[in-house]
Image: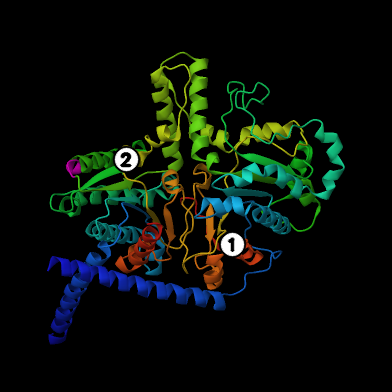
């Protein structure tokens, strides 16, 4: 009797799953055909993120290597869209670090024409290491007088465009009264476009490296008991988001395109994009190891019913790279514009 | 009078039948893979109340009833660990009246839920209150201590009540604790790994398993400083537009089915 009951419950569960799969397929169809087109790229939106993150997700890590070229092509397109909308900072993530390894290639692709004149002047001043600088390197810039061993944060930052002087920055800030999408005017040309390339190592590993660095400093600075060690959220934040170090770099007026291993700030919007076609009609959001510190208030955008599912039978046999397309990007911006930010209140 | 009697009788039958159906459905769902740890951001209490032209504190009270309901569902499904975001450190910014009302509700419900014979006792659930408890009023801290003591011996499941919690505060405390631990070791070269920090994360300290599903209600699509460390790997993050006080088994079911499909397809 027990066996029959258990067989029966399993069978009913199976039927429920069949029903659920059908409901998802129907929803996917409806969303595919009936979904409204998102607003055009350049239109004025209620709020536009100043920093977007793009998470290239895959259930199969080897595909990240396989589609490296396609991801780089895709990033170039996304950068162009960001510049149209007026988004000044883009972070790209893949779990394995394929993009981090290609950061040199990315810099070459993204180099705008205006910088051609600068190349000879700044090239000699700057090092462009392909691998991150060692944290114990005596040449590394100190974050503050006491902290002279910056932790390995595994974040590669690039800065594209002319950096403004502190006076220019003050003038720009005075002229902007509220945040709004940039139209084609002088201010957009002065502000640099910042680009961060990160991987899983930029997250939990960076946090544990921060802990290592803090403990080594405490050890060398004062040989007192471990009990009086304290650290504040702001201190940790300034290391992981790199604010202090980036400020130093900018104040020194360095026209560098490679800012170095200084962490990255929190993105306001994240687009989680599956690069492979989905086996099922419905896709569930996962973060694939994205750095936890920076996603405190990030709005997530994820396509639950990807259109690719309709040709997935053909695609499953020979998986093709699914690019982030402009429609998805515009939908993400529309959703962000409609989001209400209460900040705890 | 007869009409009201018939109506009441039918409601009673409907409740009994729906209760039986619900239990049968739960048994069916429990025959498949079940997540070990589910977390809920109980969002939407105030909007729920406003929509029904009620006072905000009534929305929170309904929210507590929803918590009871969902907790019972999870227990019947054999979910070992449930974590809920009851109050964020940021929420202290709300109006003093609302904060006071929430603190009073917390004190009252903590006592209620940990009473002998009530939900936690019934299902052998140990209560852990996670967060910066020093920020709570003294009376609430006392209620917390009492509730934790009363349920300390329960070992079938656990309920983590995050109050007042912020994930960045959690991670900062974990960094601080891991540094102190490393300094005590007094070795020449200190290296702190991810696992060393992980051990001091609040949910790990109380023995919670890895997070399988994180649910946020009311249609908001962000984590708002909740379980960032725990949820950034392969946790399924589910956003549902239902307001928390309305959340029930039929809303939870698709999330469970998604989890089961994930487990079966990776097997």
A264 sits to left or right of A252: left
Q: Residue at x 82, y 31 (%)?
A: A124
Point out the stretch of residues depicted in magenta: B150-154
Q: Is residue B151 magenta?
A: yes
Q: Is residue B14 magenta?
A: no
Q: Quadrant of the N terminus of chain A?
A: bottom left
Whether A196 is drawn above or below B243: the answer is: above
Number of numbered discs: 2
Residue A331, how many percent across, how many down?
A: 60, 65
Q: How is the image coloured?
A: rainbow
Answer with the quarter of the image where residue A20 lies: bottom left
Instruction: Specify the farthest residue to the top.
Output: A223
Residue B152, how many percent across, how many down?
A: 20, 41
Q: Looking at the image, which is closer to me, A168 or A289?
A: A289
Q: Is residue B118 visible?
A: yes
Instruction: Specify the farthest residue to the front.
Output: A317
Q: Chain of mark 2?
A: B
Q: Which residue is mark 2?
A: B137
Residue A134, how many percent across, how many down?
A: 62, 27
Q: Secondary structure at mark 1?
A: helix
Q: Residue at x 54, y 73 (%)?
A: A310
Whether B134 is drawn above or below A92: the answer is: above
Mark 2 and mark 1: span between their CA atoms? 41 Å
Q: Is residue A268 visible?
A: no
A238 sits to left or right of A232: right
Q: Which residue is mark 1?
A: A332
């Amino acid at each position: 009797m027990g066996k029959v009951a258990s067989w029966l419950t399993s069978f009913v569960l199976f039927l429920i799953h069949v029903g659920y799969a059908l409901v998802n397929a129907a929803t996917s169809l409806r969303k595919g055909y009936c979904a409204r087109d998102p607003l055009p790229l350049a239109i004025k939106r209620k709020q536009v993120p100043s920093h977007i993150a793009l998470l290239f997700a895959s259930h199969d890590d080897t595909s990240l290597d396989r589609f490296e070229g396609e991801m780089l092509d895709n990033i170039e397109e996304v950068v162009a869209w960001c510049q149209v909308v007026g988004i000044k900072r883009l972070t790209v993530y893949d779990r394995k670090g394929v993009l981090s390894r290609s950061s040199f290639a990315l810099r070459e692709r993204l180099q705008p024409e205006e910088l051609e004149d600068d190349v000879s002047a700044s090239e000699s001043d700057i090092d462009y290491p392909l691998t991150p600088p060692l944290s114990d390197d005596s040449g590394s810039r100190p974050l503050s007088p006491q902290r002279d061993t910056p932790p390995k944060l595994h974040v590669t930052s690039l800065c594209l465009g002319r950096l403004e002087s502190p006076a220019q920055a003050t003038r720009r800030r005075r002229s902007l009264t509220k945040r709004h999408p940039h139209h084609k005017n002088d201010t957009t040309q002065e502000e640099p476009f910042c680009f961060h390339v990160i991987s899983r190592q930029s997250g939990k590993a960076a946090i544990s490296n921060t802990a290592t660095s803090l403990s080594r400093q405490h050890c060398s600075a004062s040989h007192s008991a471990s009990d009086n060690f304290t650290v504040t959220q702001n201190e940790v934040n300034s290391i992981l988001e790199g604010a202090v170090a980036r400020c130093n770099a900018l104040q020194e007026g360095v026209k560098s395109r490679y800012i170095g291993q200084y962490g990255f700030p929190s993105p306001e919007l994240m687009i989680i994009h599956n690069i492979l076609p989905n086996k099922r009609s419905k896709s569930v959001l996962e973060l694939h190891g994205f750095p936890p510190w920076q996603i405190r208030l990030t709005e997530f955008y994820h396509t639950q019913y990807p259109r690719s599912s309709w040709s997935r039978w053909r695609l499953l046999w020979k998986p093709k790279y699914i690019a982030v397309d402009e429609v998805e990007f515009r939908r993400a911006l529309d959703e962000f514009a409609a989001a209400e930010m209460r900040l705890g209140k | 009078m007869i009409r009201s009697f018939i109506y009441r009788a039918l409601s009673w039958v409907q409740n009994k039948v729906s209760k039986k159906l619900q239990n049968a459905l739960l048994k069916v769902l429990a025959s498949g893979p079940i997540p070990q740890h589910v977390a809920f951001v109980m969002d939407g209490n105030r909007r729920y109340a406003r929509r029904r032209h009620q006072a905000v504190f009534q929305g929170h009270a309904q929210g507590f009833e929803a918590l009871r309901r969902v907790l019972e569902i999870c227990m019947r499904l054999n979910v070992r660990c449930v974590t809920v975001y009851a109050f964020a450190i940021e929420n202290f910014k709300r109006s003093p009246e609302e904060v006071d009302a929430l603190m009073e509700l917390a004190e009252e419900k903590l006592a209620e839920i940990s009473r002998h014979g009530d939900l936690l006792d019934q299902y052998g659930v140990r209560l852990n209150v996670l967060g910066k408890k020093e920020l709570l009023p003294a009376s609430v801290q006392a209620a917390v201590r009492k509730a934790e003591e009363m349920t300390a011996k329960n070992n079938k499941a656990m309920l983590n009540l995050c109050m007042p919690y912020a994930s960045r505060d959690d991670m900062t405390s974990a960094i601080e604790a891991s540094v102190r631990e490393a300094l005590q070791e007094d070795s020449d070269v200190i290296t702190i790994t991810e696992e060393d920090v992980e051990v001091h994360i609040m949910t790990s300290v109380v023995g919670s398993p890895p997070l399988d599903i994180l649910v946020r209600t009311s249609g908001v699509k962000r984590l708002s400083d909740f379980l960032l460390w725990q949820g950034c790997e392969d946790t399924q993050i589910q956003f549902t537009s239902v307001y928390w006080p309305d959340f029930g088994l039929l809303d939870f079911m698709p999330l469970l089915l998604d989890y089961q499909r994930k487990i079966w397809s990776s097997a």
